[in-house]
């Protein structure tokens, strides 16, 4: 795992991209990232069941300056304010301790960032109890890991995403910016 000073040096070399980059976000072994300005929620499907073989519509929920209250038992998708990733490093996303202490869980099921995935990251958010979030608030940390062996750049279905992206698992979903 890279240390804060090693992350700063890798950003300077272009081996890691964090934009915008604020040196005060550097931690001992990570970089603190921020919440973007939009949430997505899945529209309740017929029968109340999300089906990965169905193209499921989403609702866009802008996060106003006054905040947005996340409700329990609802999956929210949000994007990081920063474009982040490593051109020769893998990354992992984690909640920051202060956010976790509020009962807000982020990115528990898909924390791995592949080498070459330099994007605003879509975050999975779940609240244990109602909690208000704000655009630009520190929400998590990204840690970077050196690669061993031949590094292959990520070319998966979320390549080139420019913000919060719903699941593209359903047949026929091929572009990251396709929403309903």
Image (cartoon, rainbow, N blue to C red):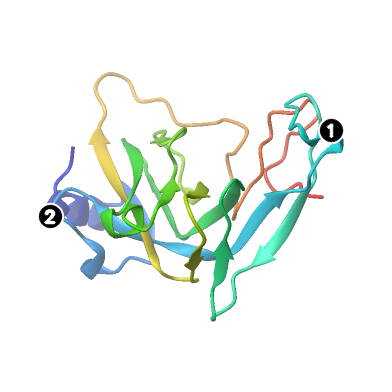
x and y, in percent, of residue 115 in the image: 39, 34
x and y, in percent, of residue 127 in the image: 49, 52
x and y, in percent, of residue 118 in the image: 45, 46
Residue drawn at x 57%, y 39% is 159
Residue for badge 2: 5
Residue 89, picture quadrant: top left
Q: Is residue 46 left or right of residue 152?
A: right
Residue for badge 1: 47
Residue drawn at x 27%, y 54% is 97
Q: Quadrant of the N terminus?
A: top left
Q: Residues within 10 Å of mark 2 (few under 14, many from 20)?
A: some
Q: CA distance from mark 1 to mark 2?
A: 51 Å
Q: Residues within 10 Å of mark 1 (few under 14, many from 20)?
A: few
The residue nearer to you, when weighing 46 against 121, is: 46
> Of discs 1 and 2, which sits in the foreground?
1
Residue drawn at x 61%, y 63% is 38
x and y, in percent, of residue 141 in the image: 31, 52
Tag 2 or tag 1, which sits nearer the N-term? 2
The residue nearer to you, when weighing 10 against 36, is: 36
The residue nearer to you, when weighing 32 against 103, is: 103
For the residue labelled by badge 2, is the local secondary structure a helix, a strand or a loop? helix
Q: Is residue 160 left or right of residue 108?
A: right
């Amino acid at each position: 795992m890279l240390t804060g000073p090693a992350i700063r040096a890798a950003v300077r070399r272009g081996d890691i991209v964090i934009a915008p980059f604020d040196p005060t976000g550097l931690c001992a072994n990570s970089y603190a990232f921020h919440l973007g300005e939009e949430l997505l929620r899945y529209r309740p499907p017929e029968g109340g069941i999300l089906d990965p073989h169905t193209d499921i519509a989403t609702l866009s929920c802008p996060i106003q300056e006054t905040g947005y209250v996340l409700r329990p038992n609802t999956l929210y998708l949000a994007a990081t304010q920063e474009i982040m990733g490593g051109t020769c490093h893998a990354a992992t996303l984690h909640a920051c301790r202060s956010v976790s202490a509020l009962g807000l869980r982020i990115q528990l099921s898909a924390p791995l960032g592949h080498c070459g995935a330099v994007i605003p990251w879509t975050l999975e958010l779940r609240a244990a109890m109602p909690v208000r979030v704000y655009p630009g608030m520190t929400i998590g940390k990204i840690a970077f890991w050196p690669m061993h062996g031949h590094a292959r750049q990520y070319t998966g279905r979320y390549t080139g995403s420019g913000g919060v992206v719903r699941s593209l698992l359903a047949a026929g979903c091929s572009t990251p910016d396709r929403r309903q």
